[in-house]
Amino acid sequence: MSTPVDATTTGAWTALTAHRDALTPDLRAWFAADAERATRLTRQLGDLTVDLSKNLVTDETLALLVALAEQVDLKTRTAAMFAGEHINVTEDRAVLHTALRRPADAEPPLVVDGQDVDADVQEVLAKVAAFAEKVRSGEWTGVTGERVETVVNIGIGGSDLGPVMAYEALKPYVQDGLEVRFVSNIDPTDLAEKVKDLDPTTTLFIVASKTFGTLETLTNARLARDWLWQGLVVSRAIEDTDEARTAAVAKHFVAVSTALDKVAAFGIDPENAFGFWDWVGGRYSVDSAIGTSLAIAIGPDAFGEFLEGFHVVDEHVRTTPFEQNVPVLMGLLNVWYVNFLDAHTHAVLPYAQYLHRFPAYLQQLTMESNGKSVRWDGTPVTTQTGEVFWGEPGTNGQHAFYQLIHQGTRLIPADFIAVANPAHPLKDGGTDVHALFLANFFAQTKALAFGKTADEVRAEGTAEEIVPARVFSGNRPTTSILAPSLTPSVLGQLIALYEHITFVQGVVWGIDSFDQWGVELGKKLALEIAPAVEGDAAALAGQDPSTQALIAKYLELRTV
Ligand code: F6P
């Protein structure tokens, strides 16, 4: 196992610290003195125009950050990831989500651990595509011969957040007459609400679980199976026999997993299971067979375009010098804010309603990846790591939490994302509503960057005692990302952009961004506590006083 470079011991880190101490960010002055700043700090990444100029950086800051990337050997680590080295050291696994989107004819073929990864990926893709076509055309039917109208994806974490986010983002591409719903929470309300108006004869469940051992997913899958059987038997669509039930599962359940033996044990025909590999992390898996629900909804061609979008970014990351490399620069900017300017959080604010689940998706991607306190060799980290990612679509956020971003005491770097062409170019009288919407996108980053001085407030005739409350300090950093339209390819580009940003930050911090041991303890304890919650007195007695009292109160309150 290699020892990560301790970023804090590098010359670049020392220089960045001195640079930070000497720097007084002043975006007004910087823009006034430098007519080229916006042009010089805008980069192109595939279809994405990325304006970095409203960040609290000078050319020197960027040069030092690039030096930092070189000194922690980002280049070697990136090459190791693309080549399939086992950089997920605590699980001894390759990290190869980039292989999921390599073109079918990519040369030379990618062989990892003796396995032709390209061939494996293409085989599963073809299987998913064929299945998706059957569902879309109506060739695949339920047990009574009805075509599928609703697909219900049952999964959680990476087996849910990616597919639901992408499905919502690509709604205009969804085939008429098809709907996908997503069940994730073990709160039985989730499943109950999602299926309550569905007809079992036209419903197909996809049980999506990398491990096929996740409590929430398997519980929901069993509840769904019961719902299916009950509905089919009560409506006399099937006989109330074991054989009929087995046949119903075969037509109404498929699975996506790396554990095909467990899929079979659940009763799902392995023919109807789509595999993937342990080198795909859950939060990096939307472009694997985990995206089967999406492939059904938008079709294999659009799913292929989605993958092409990812690949555009992978190629950019692999081949572009750091100075021009957008994910590298954005990852380094995040390091700058977290480690040198004491930012604790990072907002992602899509000005595109279809991206409304994108911040939630990014929360798992970034925080499960980089929420770590030890480095990949097991030694403690030497600086702060993973910031909190959060956000909501604009303009809703403007009327909720932007106050704090504009005038609060904390520095909150924010990414603003917008598309030029709306899916719904509606007019309000003579007004183009999308233009009005994007006026907000442009206005917010302008206000955050340049603020409003006390003199400007006074000049509006504001009473002196109210002036301080109406001053905007400015110098609140943002990155603006503008795409032509929210196509499958653009969505793939956006996702890959953030995957690589996350990777870059992890490398600087020396952490394994691909394991997630931090979610294990709570899972284990929930299983241990479950008997107490069901009223087992001995199990209850074994709990700590706070947990005991809470469970006792719960048992007292529980009436149904
Ligand atoms: O508990 C966290 C986690 O392991 C995530 O990393 C993963 O995406 C999620 O659970 C679901 O896991 P699975 O796909 O194996 O059901």
Image (cartoon, helix red, strand yellow):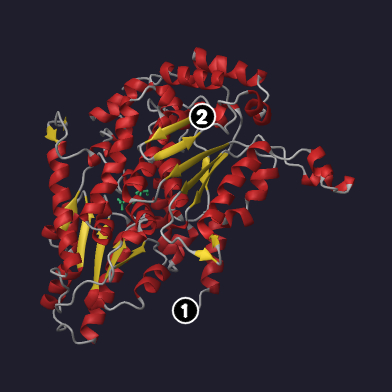
Residue 86 at least partly seen: no
Residue at the spot of label 1: 560
Residue 292, x across and y down, in percent: 24, 56
Question: Is 477 situated above or below 293?
Answer: above
Outermost residue, right direction? 464
Q: Position of residue 343 (x, y in %)?
A: 59, 35
Residue 203 picture location, percent across and down: 25, 72
Q: How many marks?
A: 2
Q: Is residue 552 above or below residue 339?
A: below
Residue at the image point whose x is 32% and y is 53% from the top: 159
Q: Nearer the viewer, residue 140 or 475?
A: 475
Q: Residues within 10 Å of mark 2 (few under 14, many from 20)?
A: few
Badge 1 element? loop
| Left or right: where 175 falls relative to 134 | right
**Which of the two residues, 39 or 46, is positioned nearer the viewer here?**
39
Question: Percent position (x, y) of residue 9?
Answer: 50, 15
User: Which amino acid type corresponds to the residue marked 2 in the rendered image?
Assistant: Thr
Most distant residue in the front direction? 430
Tell me if residue 50 comes above or below residue 290 in the rendering: above
**Label 1 vs label 2: CA separation?**
63 Å
Q: Is residue 230 left or right of residue 362?
A: left
Dot 2 corresponds to which residue?
39
Mark found first going from the N terminus, 1 or 2: 2
Q: Nearer the viewer, mark 1 or mark 2?
A: 2
Q: Residue at x 44, y 63 (%)?
A: 532
